[in-house]
Amino acid sequence: DSGVTQTPKHLITATGQRVTLRCSPRSGDLSVYWYQQSLDQGLQFLIQYYNGEERAKGNILERFSAQQFPDLHSELNLSSLELGDSALYFCASSAAPGLAVKTNEQFFGPGTRLTVL
Amino acid sequence: DAKTTQPPSMDCAEGRAANLPCNHSTISGNEYVYWYRQIHSQGPQYIIHGLKNNETNEMASLIITEDRKSSTLILPHATLRDTAVYYCIVRVAGDSNYQLIWGAGTKLIIKP
């Protein structure tokens, strides 16, 4: 158990709909990352938040958005869903800069499997 | 971040050492080598990382060549539970942006 939780585990929805994925980082971690993994593909970095502020952006579509709340949990919002958005979505967290910096280890949650029909 | 090259798949017999190679010929002096693994659609798991010295922990050993252009992850006594996709990633440590750039990885199959 990494200490990172994600809900829901599975989500089935229709094209054109909007969904929200939720992530709670490990206790004490201020950074949260979102990744997308399509079938049999590697992980694609989407976005990183640190202590409530956006820190880095990857290949995130304009239809997707994220935020990190004061309690440090994060939500990834996916709108106008398309069939190609079906994927595993992982959240990861890491320690704040200055703490365990040598490791930069990211702890991953179990993922949310999104199916768009 | 430097690009890495890994074989797409490897087999290893249970109980033997699994040696997973990774090429990172364009690695910069301040970039570390990280290894993660992903067991069948679970969240990836950190294994080990290193800069230039060989490293060992309870899970594995990491051997980095002197020129740092390649490395090998060694699982000393592979078990069936080590069947997974193994990712080699190079990145700068201590950067405020900790994003990891993932390649296709090596699918390691441990056979009984």
Image: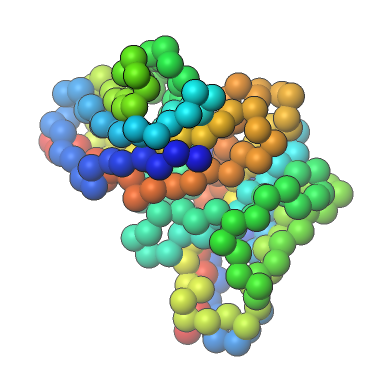
> Which is more toward the observer, B40 or A104?
A104
Q: Name the one closer to the observer, A103 or A61.
A: A61
Q: Residue at x 40, y 42 (%)?
A: B3
Kindly indicate the quadrant of the structure image that contains residue B79: top left
| Residue B75 point in image, percent of width and height | 28, 24
Q: Residue at x 34, y 32 (%)?
A: B25
Q: Is residue A6 visible?
A: no
Asked where in the image residue B4 lies, by quadrant, the reply is top left
Relative depth, front residue between A115 and A50: A50
Decide if residue B45 is on the left or right side of residue B111: right
Quadrant in which the N terminus of chain A appears: top right
Query: Residue A51: which quarter of the image?
Result: top right
Residue A7: x %, y % from top left: 63, 59
Looking at the image, residue A91 lies above or below residue A39: above
In the picture as drawn, the residue positioned furthest to the top comes out as B53
On screen, B106 above or below A17? above
- Residue A85 in the image: state x and y as whole percent: 51, 73
Residue A114 visible to an observer of this rendering: yes
* Residue at 37%, 59% in the rendered image: A41
Give how far across and how far down residue B5 sits, in percent: 31, 41
- Farthest right residue in view: A70
